Amino acid sequence: MAVSATAGPRRPGKEMWPRMADLQRGSCHRMRSPLFAAAVLAVFAVTGCALDTVSPARTAERFHAAIAAHQDESACAMLARKTADKLPDPGQTCADALEELRLGPGGKAGAVSVWGEDAQVRLAGDTVFLHHFSDGWRIRGRFAS
């Protein structure tokens, strides 16, 4: 049986691996493209996709610190606009509504989960939900127990 110097037909799904005849001719460019793409994706996976969990945690802690210090106007400034608008009853300010809620101490942030532009921060005494807006993280709501 004679052995052909040229490689046989390519198998489906194996196009990224060079044929022996291609390697003998010095043509290895087909293999470089997938390896380069894999290397670029690995770099992005390690450096470009790290989730920021510190910022939403700090926002939640600052929100509860403002409430504990009776700085309700400052706490209202950390709320998402829709949340701040829906919170007060007619004729009531956002600060009055927050004071009326008598929120307990939030404590230190524990678990933080981030999904795209949304986050959940579990504090020692509360759980808050946040959204990332163009000016930073803002409180959208809290888990009422």
Image (cartoon, helix red, strand yellow):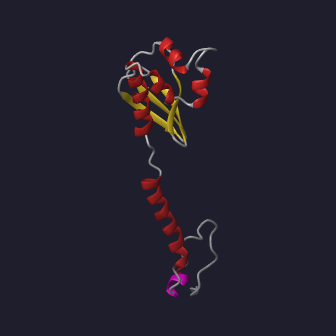
Residue 87 x/y as whole percent? 58, 19
Q: Residue at x 56, y 31 (%)?
A: 80
Position in image of residue 74 (x %, y %) = 45, 27
Image coordinates for residue 78, horizontal then vertical, percent: 49, 30
Q: How many marks?
A: 0
**Toward which corner of the image does residue 109 lie, by quadrant?**
top left
Instruction: Name the residue rendered at 62%, 14% in the picture.
Output: 91
Region of the chain picked out in magenta, as a range: 21-25
The answer to which of 40 and 19 lies nearer the viewer is 40
Residue lying furthest front in this view? 91
**Res 18 → quadrant:** bottom right
Q: Residue furthest left?
A: 108
Is 138 covered by the magenta stretch? no
Q: At 39% from the left edge and 28% from the top edge, which residue is drawn? A: 61
Relative to 29, is 92 above or below? above
Quadrant holding the N terminus: bottom right
Q: In the rendered view, would you say 78 is above or below 116?
A: above
Image point (42%, 20%), residue name: 67
Decide whether the magenta segment is chiefly helix, strand or loop.
helix
| In the image, residue 23 lies in the stretch drawn in magenta | yes
Nearest to the observer: residue 33 or residue 126:
126
